[in-house]
Image (spheres, rainbow, N blue to C red):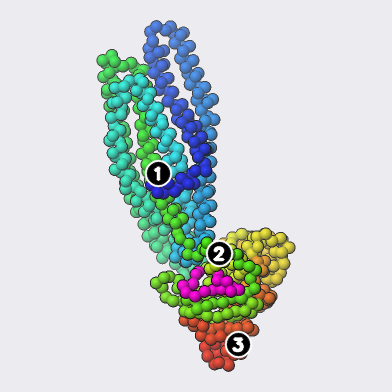
Amino acid sequence: MDSIKRYMRFVKPYKFLLFLTIIIGIIKFTIPLFLPWLLQIVLDDILLNDTLSKDEKTLQLFTWVGIGLALFFVIRPPIEYYRQYFAQNLSNNILFDIRKELYGHLQKLSLKYYANTRAGEVISRVINDVEQTKNFVMTGLMNLWLDLVTIIIVVSIMFSMDVKLTLVSLIALPFYAISVKYFFGQLRSLTRARSQALAGVQSYLHERVAGMSIIKSFTLEKHEQKIFDETNGEFLNKALDHSRWNAKSFAVVNTITDMAPLIIIGYAGYQYLQGNLTIGVMVAFYAYIDRLYGPLRRLVSSSTTLTQSIASMDRMFELMDEKYDVQNKENAIELPKAQGKLQFENVTFKYEANGNTILNKVDFTIEPGQTVAFVGMSGGGKSTIVSLIPRFYDVVEGAVKIDDLDVRDVMLPSLRSQIGIVLQDNILFSDSVKQNILMGNPTASDEQIIAAAKAANAHDFIMNLPEGYDTKVGERGVKLSGGQKQRVAIARVFLKNPPILVLDEATSALDLESEALIQDSLDRLASDRTTIVIAHRLSTITHADKIFVIEHGEVAESGNHEQLMNQHGAYYNLFQVQKLD
């Protein structure tokens, strides 16, 4: 299967450890096979041997039991320990490598993928599905082979004891193989459906936990409980379908395997009555039947486990196969230290190939060091324009250029490292204030962090937090006010110190006091660098060198505040409406 072949790439670096684990496992599984043989010796050669005296029988009995005790109490424990340790070490390292590669892959996927995919679905594949593949390592690459080797050894011992009895013991095997093939053919699709339903539950929970404040504020608890019950019920139905088929398979297979000992008892008893078999061989054979059909039962269980693992592999590799919408060209170059010149040359853009045109032949130039504002009604395309500069998306037609270089011709890290972005709702991670600021420059010193915080008017409030810079801000910065979150976000851009700055409605959702503090820090941040501002309140951008009015994905007007006011056009009308408000 293709998924298994691909999965073996992650196993290959650990092939020696896998080989060592299998060898130790074979020794571990072989040791218990000594017991039926010992039982035959004790019965036939000691207890039922009339040629030995009582003292000789006692001596031989305790000698053989002593050998058994040494085998199980001295040799087996370290073998058991190292087998378990190496097996877990191997599987956990493989899962570590897979998740490492998956996370690197997730960071390369474009924002379009995340706009169209629920976060819970992604998390389910990286956590649940990857974890399920551990069973392939433990079962398919180790236990499966160990059980097969055990079966071969047991059958070999049985043949050495009695050929006819061994052949009778194996009579159920063809029926066993047919039933396994029949039942486990459909199990893979049932397992995939079950995993998909589980991912649905996880996605729902992820979204609702994140939006619990909305649920509570609108008293939607009963409504949400009903929807969750439906989602959870869908998973229950898929899980029951899976369990029902699984139960049928085990019922049939176990019935077949349980018939074999009955056949052996009848045939062995007949052979004993005919004088062709000893009691010791009969008892040992019955014990070996358990050793034979025990691994066979495990192989049935392994079939279920492997089917589940392969279905999870399929989902895991589906995620790995997601194409990168935005990636470096083969001959991409490093973007030199940017001067800050920005050009949009007849840029047309759609989020989807068959979707609406968001930008239509947008054309403008921003000179180095200029402060430029984009204004207009919501949905006009302002935020789309700024998302094309760091190449979060690629244009459909035209070109976006920095210092006369097409952004598609330069390396992404060198491009994005020179652009700082402050949004209306900046995301902070549930770490310390210090770690959130450090995202602007992970190698910065404490002195540089404090300097950035002071420049962002954030140092004073940070020092008043319970643990200062080491205070945890909670998920998405929930423990900080809107203004505090903005100042931390601005501090990390100060630390990054990029030549190009993008401010996307960075003060529109704040109270007047916070806005004044943040506007002061933003003015300081915008000094001596190219700055692009998306503003809702026009009063905050009257100082801009140039203002572009965006309407329906096109540049409707451009000029400075005074020029646009004199035109009495779209900008003038917007300004008059806000002035009246």
On the rendered structure, is 86 left or right of 531? left
Whether residue 580 is visible: no
Q: Residue furthest front?
A: 331
Q: Which residues are magenta?
A: 393-407
Label 3 neighbour load within 10 Å: few <14, some 14-19, many 20+: many
Q: Earlier in the sequence, mark 1 or mark 2?
A: 1
Figure quadrant of the C terminus: bottom right
- Looking at the image, how many numbered discs can be counted on the residues? 3
Q: How far, Cα to Cα, is label 2 from label 3? A: 39 Å
Which label belongs to residue 306?
Answer: 1
Q: How far, Cα to Cα, is label 1 from label 2? A: 43 Å
For the residue marked with disc 2, what is the amino acid? Ala
Label 2 neighbour load within 10 Å: few <14, some 14-19, many 20+: some
Which label belongs to residue 561?
Answer: 3
Residue in the foreground of this view, choosing between 522 and 370: 370
Question: Is residue 47 shown in magenta?
Answer: no
Report helix, strand or loop for mark 2: loop
